[in-house]
Image (tube, helix red, strand yellow):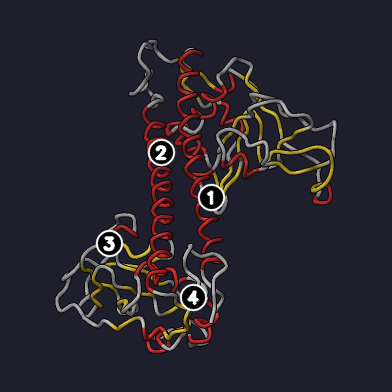
Amino acid sequence: MGKPEIRFKGFTDDWEQRKLGEVIEDYVEKTTVENQYPVLTSSQQMGIVLQDDYFSGDRVSQSGNIGYFVIPRGYFAYRSRSDNDVFVFNRNDCIDKGSISYFYPVFKPSGVDSDFLLRRLNYGLETQLKIASEGTGQHVLSLKKFKNMTALFPSINEQRKIGEYFTRLDHLITLHQRKCDEVKTLKKYMLQKMFPQNGINVPEIRFSGFTDVWEQRKLGEMGSTFTGLSGKTKEDFGHGDAKFITYMNVFSNPIADLQMTETVEIDSKQNCVKAGDVFFTTSSETPEEVGMSCVMPENADNTYLNSFCFGYRPTEKFDLNYLAYVLRSESFRKEMTFLAQGISRYNISKNKVMEVEIPVPSLEEQSKVGRYFSNLDNLITLHQRKCNELRKMKKFMLQNMFPKD
């Protein structure tokens, strides 16, 4: 009845239309005492996980969980209620046996490859799911209606091939995401340890061979500020031969991304940015996000700064990578949060920022520290890019390794 566009060599038969009730079985077992099994939850991003892990280790109340459904390893569940007709089917690969809210019907595979079923249920059935769900506000999908839906299935051998392929792909995505998260955690830790805390003149961790005390210098003693774009209206943007560094570029990157610019007309009255300039955000919705900074890595013709940031131009020589990361260190970020003022929206004074001190080691040590953090960011980018590539590949293969129902 149907064939996918891409399939493994040796498989030519049509896929067979089957009711989901033919390939899954209800599983109803309920907990009889509180905390009989660890409480699980299901999310679109993480699958079925321990509830405590999903909520970042914060203890979630499990009182009253008598009568929760039991879900053994390898069995499936889905949240039966949705605000947007999106129903995600997940498998318990977490622990041997857990409990899950009665909002999650539990079922097990029957006569099908479990890895294949996991992908089959989460791709290509959106229209049927929307039709089968009921309700005007929050939609409900009963297990009975779910089992009456139909889907195309190949032979069990082809199912296994497809299931194995996507399992390997998911493992690669998980591996790179885990590596990315590990490097991010390391970076956060080293931003705390490789720059001196307030009142201390040496860092806890430093490269061998360096023993000199770090100076504490006010930013205002080592440079001056300048303003971003001024006197512009909405009509001035989106065209022209000049560019400007966007607010999100400054907010997101320790080193400015020169691809993350927008166009504006050339205006000789504006301040052009230069290599080594530092940009600071002046406003945000939370005090923790005020005064985020980035450094301009190189000269670029006719490039300005957006109007929601101010610039700082050092008059003394810095290693640019060092300057970028010392301004993202824990101690400096605490200073920015302390200086933030406001109620619904928080602002920071550039004059106050110029009064803040930063630690200044020798240029040689600056270079070592700056290169270290630059390498960490390159690793984060590498793993994140690989994750994104694999996710795109997975999306493409899901579209082409399953026939349209």
The image shows residue 40, relative to residue 152, as above or below, that is: above
Q: CA distance from mark 2 to mark 1?
A: 19 Å
Local secondary structure at mark 4: loop
Dot 3, crowdedness within 10 Å: few (<14), some or many (≥20)?
A: some
**Residue at label 4?**
13
Q: CA distance from mark 4 to mark 2?
A: 46 Å
Precedes in sequence: disc 3 or disc 1: 3
> Nearer the viewer's eye, disc 4 or disc 2?
4
| Residue plotted at (43% across, 15% down) | 214
Amino acid identity at mark 3: Cys
Amino acid identity at mark 2: Val
Precedes in sequence: disc 4 or disc 2: 4
Measured from the top left, where is residue 178 in percent x and y?
A: 38, 47
Amino acid identity at mark 4: Asp
Amino acid identity at mark 1: Glu
Precedes in sequence: disc 2 or disc 1: 2
Q: CA distance from mark 4 to mark 3?
A: 35 Å
**Residue at label 1?**
389
The image shows residue 310, relative to residue 72, as above or below, that is: above
> Nearer the viewer's eye, disc 3 or disc 1?
1
The image shows residue 113, relative to residue 204, as above or below, that is: below
Local secondary structure at mark 3: loop
> Nearer the viewer's eye, disc 1 or disc 4?
4
| Residue plotted at (51% across, 27% down) | 356
Q: Is residue 267 left or right of residue 191?
A: right
Local secondary structure at mark 2: helix
